[in-house]
Image: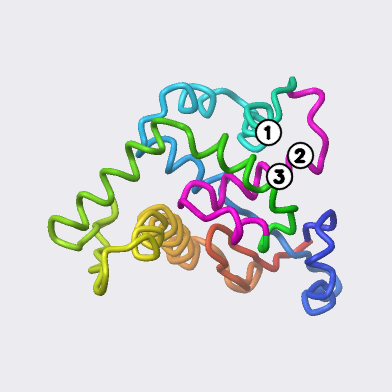
C-alpha cells in the first residue's frame, strides 16, 4: 500500500495476501485537518471541505507559495501536508524543519504563513484558556485528559493535538468494533487499526 511513499517500502514485504485474497486499505480523508477546520470555525476552509474532491494539502500549498493549484509541485504539496498535520498543533520551526526534512529557512517561512491564520490563533487561545481554568480537555466523544505540570508551550502543544488526534482514533476504533459485528470472519479478516485507517484481508 501507498506505493508512492518510499518510507513504506521496508514494510511492504510483511503484508502479503495469500492466494485468492487481497488486502483492502481504508482510511478517513484528511480527518485531523477537517476536525481543526470545524473546531476553529474556519468558515472558508469548511466551505471548501464540503465541496467534492477538495484537497486541503494542495489548497494549503497555494496559500503558502502564492501560486494557483495547477502550478503546485508534488514537493510543495508534500510540505504543505506536513504543515497541515503539525502546523495545526503549533510546532516550532526547528522541529518542523527536522521532522519534515525541510531547510530551516523554508520551514520557518512556511509555518509563519500557515500559523498566521486567525481562526487557528483563536482556537489555540481557547485551548490555553481551558487548561488555565481546570487543566482538563474533553473530546466530542467524551474522552477526558487532565494536563499536569507546567502550563508552558510544550504542554500547550500537547493540548492542541489531544482532541483532534484522540477523536479520530476513537472514531476508527468504533468503526473497527462495528465491522466485527457485520463482517463474515470467514471471508474478511481485520488486520490493523492505525490511527485513521483500517486494513483488512478479504476474498478477491
**Among the two numbered marks 3 and 1 on one chain, the one whose residue lies closer to the N terminus:** 1
- Residue behind mark 1: 61
User: How many numbered discs, if any?
Assistant: 3
Q: Which residue is at 78% across, 67% downward?
A: 8
Q: Tag 2, which secondary structure?
A: helix
Between disc 3 and disc 1, the foreground one is 3
Alpha carbon separation for disc pair 3 and 1: 13 Å
Query: Which callout, 1 or 2, points at the residue further toward the start of the chain?
Result: 1
User: Is residue 199 in view?
Assistant: yes
Give the alpha-carbon distance from disc 2 to disc 3, as whole Å: 11 Å
Left or right placement of residue 23 versus residue 3 in this view: left
- The residue pinned by badge 2 equals 76
Q: Residues within 10 Å of mark 1 (few under 14, many from 20)?
A: many
Circles 1 and 2: CB atoms closer than 8 Å = yes
Magenta stretch, main secondary structure, is helix
Percent coordinates x, y for residue 97 in the rendering: 67, 57
User: What residue lies at 49% left-to-right and 48% top-to-bottom?
Assistant: 32
| In the rendered image, the vertical position of residue 160 relative to residue 70, given as above or below | below
Q: Earlier in the sequence, mark 2 or mark 3?
A: 2
- Residue 167 vs residue 155, the one in the foreground: 155
Disc number for residue 106: 3
Q: Position of residue 178 (x, y in %)?
A: 44, 61
- What colour-coding does the image apply? rainbow
Up the image or down, 89 lies above or below 115; here it is below
Q: Position of residue 85 (x, y in %)?
A: 56, 50
Q: Which quadrant of the view contains residue 137?
A: bottom left
Q: Are marks 3 and 1 in contact (CB under 8 Å)?
A: no
Q: Residue at x 40, y 30 (%)?
A: 118
Span colored in magenta: 69-97
Q: Which mark is residue 171?
A: none
Amino acid at each position: 500500500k501507498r506505493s508512492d511513499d518510499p518510507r513504506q517500502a521496508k514494510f511492504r514485504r510483511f503484508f502479503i495476501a495469500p492466494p485468492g485474497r487481497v488486502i483492502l486499505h481504508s482510511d478517513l480523508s484528511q480527518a485531523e485537518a477537517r476536525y481543526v477546520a470545524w473546531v476553529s470555525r474556519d468558515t472558508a476552509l469548511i466551505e471548501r471541505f464540503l465541496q467534492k474532491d477538495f484537497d486541503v494539502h494542495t489548497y494549503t500549498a497555494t496559500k503558502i507559495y502564492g501560486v494557483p493549484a495547477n502550478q503546485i509541485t508534488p514537493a510543495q504539496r508534500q510540505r504543505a501536508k506536513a504543515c497541515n498535520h503539525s502546523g495545526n498543533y503549533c510546532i516550532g520551526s526547528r522541529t518542523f524543519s527536522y521532522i519534515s526534512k525541510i531547510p530551516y529557512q523554508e520551514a520557518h517561512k512556511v509555518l509563519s504563513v500557515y500559523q498566521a491564520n486567525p481562526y487557528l490563533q483563536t482556537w489555540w487561545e481557547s485551548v490555553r484558556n481551558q487548561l488555565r481554568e481546570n487543566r482538563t480537555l474533553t473530546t466530542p466523544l467524551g474522552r477526558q485528559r487532565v494536563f499536569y505540570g507546567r502550563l508552558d508551550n510544550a504542554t500547550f502543544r500537547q493540548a492542541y493535538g489531544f482532541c483532534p488526534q484522540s477523536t479520530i482514533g476513537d472514531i476508527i476504533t468504533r468503526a473497527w468494533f462495528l465491522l466485527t459485528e457485520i463482517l463474515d470472519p470467514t471471508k474478511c479478516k481485520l488486520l490493523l487499526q492505525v490511527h485513521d485507517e483500517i486494513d483488512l484481508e478479504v476474498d478477491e
